[in-house]
Amino acid sequence: MTIGSTYQHFATKADFKAIKPPGRLIFVGGLNVHIYCIGEGPTTVILEGGAGTTTQAWAWIQPEIGKRTRVCSYDRAGYGWSAPSYRPMDALNTSRELHDLLKAADIPAPYILTGHSIGGVYARMFAADYPAEVAGLVLIDATSPSVLESYAEVDLPKVEDWTPPSLRVFPYLASVGAMRIVVNLGFFNLASGLPADAEAIAKAFLSTPEHMRATISEYGFLSDSLKQVRALHPQPTLPVAVIAAAQFGGMDEKMESTFVHWHHKQQRTWLDISPKSSFRIIDGSDHVSLMTNKLHAHEVANSIVRMVESVGRR
């Protein structure tokens, strides 16, 4: 254990000696929070990543959007270069913390909120909390509140059980260097397929106990977040673009077909937010490749840019 801890300490120190945050550290709510913005334009796209991801998750997508308008990604508390927080990592708190960050960083509305996976839940909450500041909403394979009731249709456990107690060992594994070995072997590497520099940075963060603790904490509040969003009212004037993955790996053909059908049904529930909604499935994509595969990410970026252009015309 001592050898592993020593290895992890010096390996992490070496990782971050050469890695500098691409954006700014903003002191807000008693914490330093990292936000990275590029591009110029009257509308700002705000990117909310999935659980366990950092600003690097948008490495394919953010530069393409930045050619058309201003676009900002950021690290939620405990991820990337942002300090950890002891506040609940649910949708209500995340929405408010993001709003405070945008004000402290002097990034004015209007915004197009864009969220992948659980980030879509937070983006939906932000759109409801600050409707006068949100010009559009893009949900990328976002976790739908409907799974709170429909989980049994495909033999999934209840959402409250999606974070088994066994995951509590992951921060310990990270502290003795085991997660670094696992990630470098290609397991649990959520960044595989990103540009090489972004993947290297993301893997360095994935190997730290702080990152593991934040991920486990966030999943622990998933049920609360979904219940909070389920209680929201429709926003009939809000443009909404829903993007869904086309497939899922690790299943036999029959099981995958059943799961994909169920998943797309859950994704379509997001269309109830507004009659100004669109739905798109990106061919060949899965939940992670929408972000990490260059071609799939390009299609995601195109959908976001179309939302930017639509909002601009209005």
Image (cartoon, helix red, strand yellow):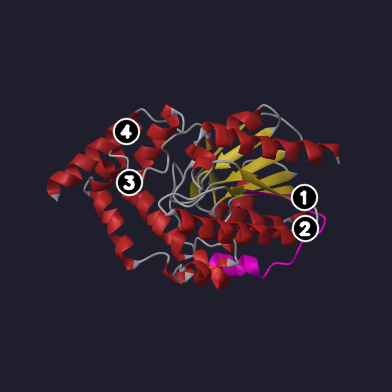
Give the mark nearest the N terminus, 2 or 1.
1
Q: Give the residue at x 30% y 54%.
A: 171
Q: Are marks 2 and 1 in contact (CB under 8 Å)?
A: yes
**Badge 2 density bin: few <14, some 14–19, many ≥20, Cα 10 Å:** some
For residue 133, above or below residue 152: above
Res 193 label: none
Res 208 label: 3
Q: Magenta stretch containing residue 228, yes or no? A: yes
Q: Amino acid at mark 3?
A: Thr
Q: Are marks 1 and 4 in contact (CB under 8 Å)?
A: no
Q: The C terminus is located in which quarter?
A: top right
Q: Nearer the viewer, residue 40 or 188?
A: 188
For marks 4 and 3, give the CA distance: 11 Å
Q: Which residues are magenta?
A: 224-243
Q: Are marks 2 and 4 in contact (CB under 8 Å)?
A: no
Q: Are marks 2 and 3 in contact (CB under 8 Å)?
A: no
Q: Which residue is mark 2?
A: 274
Q: Is residue 97 left or right of residue 158?
A: right
Indicate the position of residue 137 as horizontal and vertical percent values. Answer: 70, 49
The quarter of the picture where residue 147 lies is bottom right
Indicate the position of residue 218 as horizontal and vertical percent values. Answer: 46, 59
Q: Give the residue at x 70% y 32%.
A: 69
For marks 2 and 4, give the CA distance: 45 Å
**Badge 3 density bin: few <14, some 14–19, many ≥20, Cα 10 Å:** many
Q: Which residue is mark 4?
A: 15
Count of all numbered marks drawn on residues in the image: 4
**Badge 1 density bin: few <14, some 14–19, many ≥20, Cα 10 Å:** many
* Kind of element beneath mark 3: loop
For marks 2 and 3, give the CA distance: 40 Å
Q: Amino acid at mark 1?
A: Pro
